[in-house]
Amino acid sequence: MIEWTASPFFGVALSVLAFWIGVRLQKRTGLVICNPLLVGILLVIAVLAALKIPYENYRQGGDLINLFLSPATACLAVAIYSKIQILKKNWLPVLVGCTVGSLTSMGSVWVLCRLFGLEEALTASLLPKSVTTPIAVSVAEAHGGISSITVVAVILTGIFGSMVAPLLIRLFRVKDPVTAGLAIGACSHAMGTSKALELGETEGAMSGLAIGVCGLITVVLSMFLL
């Protein structure tokens, strides 16, 4: 069985099945904690641990899925283009909001890392946690960070953001869809954007826009903070 799991199709099939179970579970229960990605991750870990399957075997399929990460992120441009008039009308709030969001995220991480005395490699790994994975990994590696830690930080940030975003929007009574979308995208990248799309087309478009703008701002800010 171990030899069979070395096939890339095993990792792909396990990932798709685990995520599908997560989607079904969330629809059945309606619980925020039953995030499909979180459930999928836990199920994959449980299967690998229970069957004693080496992580290297699963990674054969995981790397195949990762190939589609950047194109999937780029596809968000379709939603952005559909709301181009809103973007032209609100370009200044978009730029200011994304700048403040990126600065707050990176600044808080930098301060906490300094307070707890973390080494430079860990700081570089955690600093770009609020941008999409391809950009975050590139920023971390360029400054001596550990890409695996960066990926985990990005995933956890995205899951948490997608879970609490609707609650925070209701709590702070955010009515403007542009504001809601930018806030979600600036804090929780692509995973948050998937939740923003559920809230509305405008929210999803603005959240997707925030991914790109915050990614560029993060690259620039990282040169001064690291």
Image (cartoon, rainbow, N blue to C red):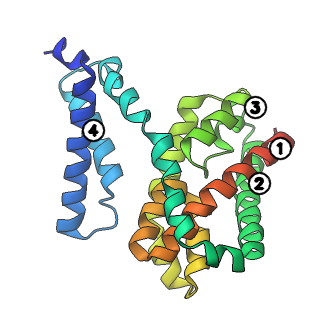
Q: Earlier in the sequence, mark 1 or mark 3?
A: 3
Residue at 58% x, 30% y is 147
Q: Earlier in the sequence, mark 2 or mark 3?
A: 2
Residue at 64% x, 41% y is 126
Viewed as shown, does residue 223 lie left or right of 88? right
> What type is the residue that disc 1 sits on?
Leu
Q: Earlier in the sequence, mark 1 or mark 4?
A: 4
Furthest toward the left, the residue is 1
Q: Earlier in the sequence, mark 2 or mark 4?
A: 4
Contact, mark 2 vs mark 1 (Cβ under 8 Å): yes
Residue 155: horizontal and vertical position, in percent?
A: 48, 46
Residue 148: horizontal and vertical position, in percent?
A: 53, 30
> What type is the residue that disc 2 sits on?
Gly
- Quick one: quadrant of the N terminus? top left
Question: Which one is in front in this view, the residue at disc 1 or the one at disc 4?
Answer: 4
Q: Which residue is mark 2?
A: 107
Tag of residue 15: 4
Q: Total marks drawn?
A: 4
How far is the residue under mark 2 from the one under mark 1?
8 Å
- Quick one: quadrant of the C terminus? top right
> What type is the residue that disc 3 sits on?
Glu
Q: Secondary structure at mark 4?
A: helix
How far is the residue under mark 1 from the one under mark 4?
36 Å
How far is the residue under mark 2 from the one under mark 3?
15 Å
| Nearer to us in this view, 137 or 78 | 78
Question: Which one is in front in this view, the residue at disc 4 or the one at disc 3?
Answer: 4
Residue density around tag 1, few if under 14, some if 14–19, many if 20 or more, within 10 Å: few
Tag of residue 225: 1
Viewed as shown, does residue 142 lie left or right of 9? right
Tag of residue 120: 3
Residue at 71% x, 38% y is 123
